[in-house]
Amino acid sequence: MRILLINPNTTESMTMTAAKAAREVAATGTEVLARTSRMGPVSIEGYYDEALAVPGLLQELAVGQKEGAEAAIIACFDDTGLDAARALATIPVIGICEAAVATACFIAQRFTIVTTMKRSRLPLEHLVHRYGATGRCKVRAADIPVLSLEDPASNARDRLRSEIRLALQEDKAEAIILGCAGMADLTRELRLEFGVPVIDGVAAAVKQAEALISLGLSTAKSNAYALPVEKEYVGLLSAFAPQALR
Amino acid sequence: MRILLINPNTTESMTMTAAKAAREVAATGTEVLARTSRMGPVSIEGYYDEALAVPGLLQELAVGQKEGAEAAIIACFDDTGLDAARALATIPVIGICEAAVATACFIAQRFTIVTTMKRSRLPLEHLVHRYGATGRCKVRAADIPVLSLEDPASNARDRLRSEIRLALQEDKAEAIILGCAGMADLTRELRLEFGVPVIDGVAAAVKQAEALISLGLSTAKSNAYALPVEKEYVGLLSAFAPQALR
Amino acid sequence: MRILLINPNTTESMTMTAAKAAREVAATGTEVLARTSRMGPVSIEGYYDEALAVPGLLQELAVGQKEGAEAAIIACFDDTGLDAARALATIPVIGICEAAVATACFIAQRFTIVTTMKRSRLPLEHLVHRYGATGRCKVRAADIPVLSLEDPASNARDRLRSEIRLALQEDKAEAIILGCAGMADLTRELRLEFGVPVIDGVAAAVKQAEALISLGLSTAKSNAYALPVEKEYVGLLSAFAPQALR
Amino acid sequence: MRILLINPNTTESMTMTAAKAAREVAATGTEVLARTSRMGPVSIEGYYDEALAVPGLLQELAVGQKEGAEAAIIACFDDTGLDAARALATIPVIGICEAAVATACFIAQRFTIVTTMKRSRLPLEHLVHRYGATGRCKVRAADIPVLSLEDPASNARDRLRSEIRLALQEDKAEAIILGCAGMADLTRELRLEFGVPVIDGVAAAVKQAEALISLGLSTAKSNAYALPVEKEYVGLLSAFAPQALR
Amino acid sequence: MRILLINPNTTESMTMTAAKAAREVAATGTEVLARTSRMGPVSIEGYYDEALAVPGLLQELAVGQKEGAEAAIIACFDDTGLDAARALATIPVIGICEAAVATACFIAQRFTIVTTMKRSRLPLEHLVHRYGATGRCKVRAADIPVLSLEDPASNARDRLRSEIRLALQEDKAEAIILGCAGMADLTRELRLEFGVPVIDGVAAAVKQAEALISLGLSTAKSNAYALPVEKEYVGLLSAFAPQALR
Amino acid sequence: MRILLINPNTTESMTMTAAKAAREVAATGTEVLARTSRMGPVSIEGYYDEALAVPGLLQELAVGQKEGAEAAIIACFDDTGLDAARALATIPVIGICEAAVATACFIAQRFTIVTTMKRSRLPLEHLVHRYGATGRCKVRAADIPVLSLEDPASNARDRLRSEIRLALQEDKAEAIILGCAGMADLTRELRLEFGVPVIDGVAAAVKQAEALISLGLSTAKSNAYALPVEKEYVGLLSAFAPQALR
């Protein structure tokens, strides 16, 4: 199986972290093709970055699909451009927040997502609602910049830990979801430390991608995910006309 | 008052239609600055076009804001890029679906949006849910391409009429929302023909924009709509780094 | 444009406060006709007062409509008698809670209503639910009598301020709605003091009234808001037979 | 036990029908005190009549409570003035729609209310929502005036029957609620005819009233149902100052 | 009237407590037939015990129904086996959580269930949701074993009291539901102590059972509650084939 | 990986069908241990059978877990005894309805479950609600007995086909879920025939089981899924005391 892992921000090191997490859980015989967006923001922190990260994501999706990927994963926890990607692709596309929430639902009645920035809290609550888990899942923010997770000198990981502690005490969370692709390498460590299930979205998405490929299932193309209508695109984005990209 | 009306697709004639509808209801002293996106799809039909229309929209928003606009309207019924626009802008930003639904709630307990393409039905249902009107508002599609509304030879307007008829009979709709900026010129005619309130989103949004300006209110910038963090943007979209665009 | 502003309690000074707030935001050319109920309670504090304030409200609505008002505003934050008023009137009718909530939705994802009495908290939560904003909007009570807002010797305004502070901290409110028509004169001051959008329902309702008039829209009269059936009314309320009042 | 049954419209014959239905199911030793409102509409058809029926209802409630009633029933299916009545009374107050819906929930997963006028459909849907039964309970209207139920020459009862038939077929209703106090005498007959549980709200409310009295339970008076604040009432309704009425 | 009260655990003394509470509120002429399950757990603490208590419950239901019971009550607060019991029986079946919640809704807008074990909190929240009271009703656990309620040496009743105190303060509960059949004897005492309505599910269920019997209503047998299909049952449970048990 | 597949009814041939479907999609190296319940009903058709199938299911779960299974699947579409099983087990437990719904959510916005008997429709709707997919997922019943699926002479498969046709037309379903473990062998055939994704719960559950094992995740044992408390069990079910079974 060939799974395409797209990092929709342009920071190569975050792609590495995510790809490593993906490969650790991939089944024997699963190949993870990791691609980094070549246009847009170096990190995705809020609605503005998210919107500008979508063209780069779609471009890598089109390339990866042509190269034979059988499923695609969007490796940013706000599930950047998920709907547009599903419309464009003929292979299944999976968001890492989506996969993490679906996975948590199989093992816990109440759980909490711990994300990075305060500004991401409400957007993630909207995703949780869309994925049918409102009432089961709370969202907390550790109030740290995304790229600080990679900086050993920052106190980012301490703040993450104290937010997890609050989730267990105040939310009565039974499991924790790590709300950023850049936290993937912490999963095992936090699981041991807190003694509860800790879920990384990248790993969860790999297993969902393998599942859909094995089951021979892909996005239903009948309504909102129908292939984009061929038409003219102009200006800076003229190369994105669907007939050109596909 | 100066209101910026942005058509996020690149078809100038649709901007004209919308601007005309806007100016017809604008208060004395309100100036409508109409701008057409200079990059992306010629019409927005589904999730893919919508995503690719956002950069062009944000660009016009930044320009318009610099030129002194006091509020902005996104003149496409899927409220293209509304969240990103709200984060970028310091002036209030209004979606035409959002404005139409809010307006309908003041005058009817049950109403129906009639849109163009089948693939837009579920995305609009998601918007209706977000705007708190699920259970009050149904969505129907006339199954016509967006640009056919401008083509006198097509049967687009007939199909629109029969869908309105079904909305009144089967949904027990008390009012109709026209679910495409390109339908704005039909409002008066359909109101007379069907004898129920018919709401055009562009007109509704103009009044909400005037309201917010008069009230001295703008988007709360404290959480998800905080100004984008300054950072590097690369590749084709490098000009969109927030510090560059603002 | 002629907008009818009805104070459903019988305290003239509260009508003045509301009318002043209305006129401050009214467009050039908008005339605000302020009327005070001539029967019922001197202030509306809870379900009982609210119910007994409705006949007086409907009477002023009938008079104002005959005098040429083009839209009506109910200037009490529990949206006293809104449904009955919409059924009686042929002009649009707007509640100030309804207008404030609709306005807040355009500028904030989370907001809090701060009202007067504890007993009003749950009724306002029901209104918020009806207006589709449950989950976005919390309700707090400053635990002060309505008329104390007009008494400079009371600590009412201090208590209001501390409740706003709690809303910002604990509810993570991004904007505040003032939950009583008698607070209208505090809007500007509180906005400056707390640095967040503060919304007064009276002002918000004036803009919605102007919007509906400009758009040529009024209440759909097809289902629950159909004109009352002509019939006999007896006893003390015999003058309220719809055919008599209209 | 003494149960007060209040007909909030002024038509004595409808009080009789309801009182008869009440007495048929009352336990040995339960006395039903039936009172007819002395002011307001002769029938309640929609929001306007409902609002104007409340003062008369509250007056009879105050009298009945003074005469020793231990619980009160509001015998109109829109649960006229239920909140105001609960605030005024120190005895429990029960709505017949409320009682019918609560009773249906014990015996059926899906059921339908069949009411009289089309304009009552949405108000009853709002009640069903308030009582937590949305998704279990549909509302249908037979499109007949309330008082036609008492007229043997009208086809009202035929229309009621065909709406019940549709409820069983299309809604897959497992039980039927009669949505008007004036239908109470039809319960037994319709039960035999259609072979499904048929619930009359008046009868259901009598049993809930007896239940609350036996259990020694009454309305919690701590929040929104706290006793009305003493204050001045003016004009036509000056006799309704809470301290006067109580 | 003959009402069957089934204790689905096998502890006779808990049956006694429940039967005593039932008889105290039963109407003159109501006979309470109390039966204790003869197979399964000695107390029901969580999902596992609950599932294993169902066969014993169904057996007693079948016996009691043959002996002429006209309605049945399941005297455990998790409403053990309610759906299976409703399918098996031709008489109405009532859960004590269900009855308590329905009763509370008639007298309070907000209330709290105080149960025994922490592990029961989420299952009760699911019941509350099913009964349509989410948003009105919170659930708290005193963190005590079920059988400790019968042990005068334990501090169980103190812990119960402090949880009630928290419910009144933090949840703003207006009424309290005792979330265990073993708490039935405390109702009166706690009502006096806390000055708010306190509801015991056993007592509430007796009144609902009497209500349904008086009204001549029983479970609709048309969909999910249709009588079980006759079929072979094997092994340890072979005696439970529906045709054998009935 | 060793996955335990439990058929909670006692019909060996249905176990075979499910096991075959499971093995077809299992990854290389995954062993499927299929077990048939040894007590209870030969098929599960409605709430009564479901309840009586739980003890047999739990028994096989305990045995399978002792034999080294790393995850368990409950192979009946009503997710028989899922909560009790999760409490008992230390390995993850997956319901086939749960897995099918979670899988469908990754590939379709709207889908329909087609099940066997009419009496199963509402119980499945409750499951869909619990799994967060209400509004996305409808339930239809082909009105056929479960075991008729195995009888080539019955018209069961024709009826199933016509219900699928209705789902595509009337529900606008984009994908179909087969709502019975006994339909597993039809998946491929129906997918080709109807040209939409068709999901079998058994296959979906195998992939979710593999996913959880790979990710090292199991049920959070902190609240409602805590291990059953050790205690006495009496009578026919005395062997089910948790300390005995474990």
Image (cartoon, coloured by chain):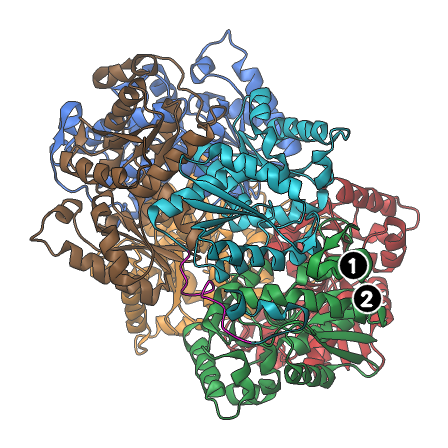
Chain colours: A orange, B red, C green, D cyan, E brown, F blue
Label tally: 2
Front one among F164 and C127: C127
Q: Which mark is residue B155?
A: none
Q: Is residue C99 above or below residue D181?
A: below
Can residue A239 be seen here? The reply is: no
Front one among E199 and D13: D13
The residue under label 2 is which amino acid type? Leu
Indicate the position of residue B105 as horizontal and vertical percent values: 68, 59
Indicate the position of residue C96 as horizontal and vertical percent values: 64, 71
Do callouts 1 and 2 point to residues on the same chain? no
Front one among B132 and A35: B132
Indicate the position of residue F77 as horizontal and vertical percent values: 41, 29
Q: Quadrant of residue E21?
A: top left
Q: Secondary structure at mark 1?
A: strand
The local crowd at label 1, few if under 14, some if 14 to 19, many if 20 or more residues have their Cα within 10 Å, is many
Q: Which residues are magenta?
A: D219-231
Quarter of the image where the N terminus of chain D is located = top left
| Image side of residue F233 versus residue A155, left or right | left
Can residue F228 be seen here? The reply is: yes
Identify the residue at image location x=67%, y=63%: C82
Q: Quadrant of residue F209?
A: top left
Identify the residue at image location x=62%, y=52%: D37
Real-space Cα distance between discs 1 and 2?
A: 8 Å
Q: Is residue C82 above or below residue C39?
A: above
Q: Which residue is mark 2?
A: C215
Q: Are marks 1 and 2 in contact (CB under 8 Å)?
A: yes
The residue under label 1 is which amino acid type? Ile
Q: Secondary structure at mark 2?
A: helix
Instruction: Tell me which secondary structure the magenta stretch mostly adopts.
Output: loop
Q: Is residue B210 above or below residue E165?
A: below
Q: Which residue is mark 1?
A: B199
Q: Is residue E13 above or below residue A129?
A: above
